[in-house]
Image (tube, grey):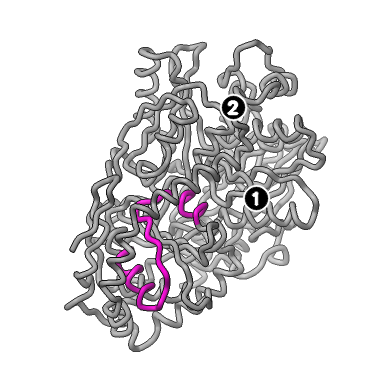
Amino acid sequence: MKYFDRTTGFTIADPTINPVKGLTCTKEDVLKSLDGYILSASGWRAVFAESKEDEDDTKKVRIEDLVITEAVTETFIEYLGVPRPRILIGVDARPTGQVLCDVAVRTLLSLGCDVTHLFFAAAPEIMAYSNAGFDGFFYISASHNPIGHNGFKFGVDGGVYNKSIIDKIIPMFLEKVNRDDVVSHAIKVISEADPDIYAEVLMKHDDDKIRAFDYYRQFVLRIATAHKLFRIPFGIVAEMNGSARSASIDIPYLNKMGAKVWAVNAQPRQIAHAIVPEGENLELCRKTLEEIHKKDSDYILGYVPDNDGDRGNFVYMKHSEGRADILNAQEVFALVALIDLAHQVMAGDKRPAIAVNGPTSNIIDEIASRLGAKVFRSDVGEANVVTLAEKLRSEEGYQVHICGEGSNGGNITHPAKVRDPMNSIMSIAKLYSIDGLYSFICSKFGIKDSEHVSIENVINALPRFTTTPAFSKDAVMRIKSTDFDALKLEYERIFLSEVDSYLKDGIAQYEVHQIEGIKEQIGLGPEFRNHPSTGGYKVIFSDSDGNFVAYIWLSKSKTEPVMRVMADVKGDNKALHDRLLSWQRSLVLRADDAVMAKKQ
């Protein structure tokens, strides 16, 4: 018997149909498929579509990937080490999520877990609700990756496990998939799930979803420190792109808070364009906002989430020009950080600070400086940023209300441990709902104050920086080397031989920062990093007085098989940005070639 999600009409599962019945593969098949997986604290991801094509929107998954799914699920429960654990499970809106979730739920039930099944759920929703007495959450998602990808996030108390824990879990998982009986064991565990117990889980789905929604709504309000009169007095275009957010609280919640909402592609899997919400993928939202604004001038903002709904980037009306414009990811984070830090300072917080990742633009440093706040940096990955923020609060006495990854947009607002476009909207709404905040920001950032709040004026007051978009083609490099110790040595050798020729255009000196996890070390060379040298690497350029001019950055992606590079330059100086970025790409390519040549 099939069970359906009452809200969306999609089939959740049929407990009477065993997804692995009659299927088999070899251990070698499993290990070959595993070669395509990336395992990190940011998520365990791979191409799950049967064809192994990035953009394949099929529901079909190979048996070897179902075997791996069972092993991942079993490893998570083994690590928890809790008798009959209460596990919260959900999926984003990818087509392959349904069968992967079916296998994971059957595994959980066979292992004696008490399962609460949310089916379609935004990442911030399932992570928030995991605080409500659950021993852990298991989420099937590949976040911003292409539609053929999928993966797993798991953790406890509202956040994914950090790197130190994931580094313990990965060997446990690899031991399982390297067993000689990995296939027969997985099929046995999946097949042993009691269909009657599974049916009971699915019969509770609608009520569980209502409880999750109620908890999540209150959580968003608590994060925003919103008083009873808090309102969102403007219209918003919600271009959902068929994401899990289309099955979450967004539209009814925003309506309840006073916002008008115009929803587009607001059914799960109604995917109209590429998933990552940057650049041209915001064009539909931008055009829609312009059209709706002509009919109703209350509409001034629009947002687009990624598939699991934690990342969300924005468009806004430029009233001065009568058109809508796209905010890049760095600007989204800078805008929200400015508003929240200003709120903290106005409220009298004594040691305000913000935790960000390495490739967050120095626009944040400029904003923090004007507000008397400190900036601290971790390596890429939400878990790293959240861990750093927690350390700053608990051990060093800083008031860290907001953290995040400017390179990806959106904000993580304490006590949340994941970014959330709902939190970004609530921060922007503070300009309207908190008395004196807009005037305070005007005084700090040289904005001409007026009785009418203007988001456009605050955006125009953001310090000007020229920054490589994290998902532009120039920011992504596919390299051949997998030995990052050797790669960075070659990179440094070439860099030192050429850097003097780049000490011009206001650049007089440089400093190297190497970041792993939450540890940032200043210095060039292997003694300032640890094997396998996959952490972030930043070269900061300054003028003769030590003032920031620019930086270049590189890091091994933790979610895709690529190297990410970027440049960040103070001011509207595209020529310097392009020159530094071109040099950075050349350094990486030549270092890669040198490493591969030595291996031949």
Label 2, secondary structure: give it: loop
Residue 542 versus residue 41 in the image, above or below? above
Main secondary structure of the magenta stretch: helix
Q: Residues within 10 Å of mark 2 (few under 14, many from 20)?
A: few
Q: Horizontal and vertical percent for residue 584?
A: 57, 47
Disc 1 secondary structure class: strand
Q: Can you give x and y, in whole percent of width and height, for residue 388 in the image?
A: 68, 55
Q: Residue furthest bottom?
A: 180
Which label sits in the foreground, 1 or 2?
A: 2
The boundaries of the magenta stretch are: 100-129
Q: Residue at x 62, y 39 (%)?
A: 361
Q: Residue at x 46, y 27 (%)?
A: 315
- Amino acid type, label 2: Leu
Label number found at residue 590: none
The kind of residue tagged 1 is Lys
What mark, if any, has residue 538 been given in the picture? 1
Tell me: 560 left or right of 160: left
The answer to if 74 sits in the magenta stretch is: no
Label 1: few (<14), some (14–19) or many (≥20) C-alpha neighbours in 10 Å: many
Sequence order check, earlier mark of 1 and 2: 2
Residue under pointer 2: 229
| Distance between the alpha carbons at the discs numbered 1 and 2 | 45 Å
Relative vertical location of residue 475 with respect to residue 227 in this rendering, above or below:
below
Residue toward you, 493 or 451: 451
Q: How many marks?
A: 2
Q: Residue at x 43, y 13 (%)?
A: 297
Rendering coords of residue 260 (x, y %): 42, 24
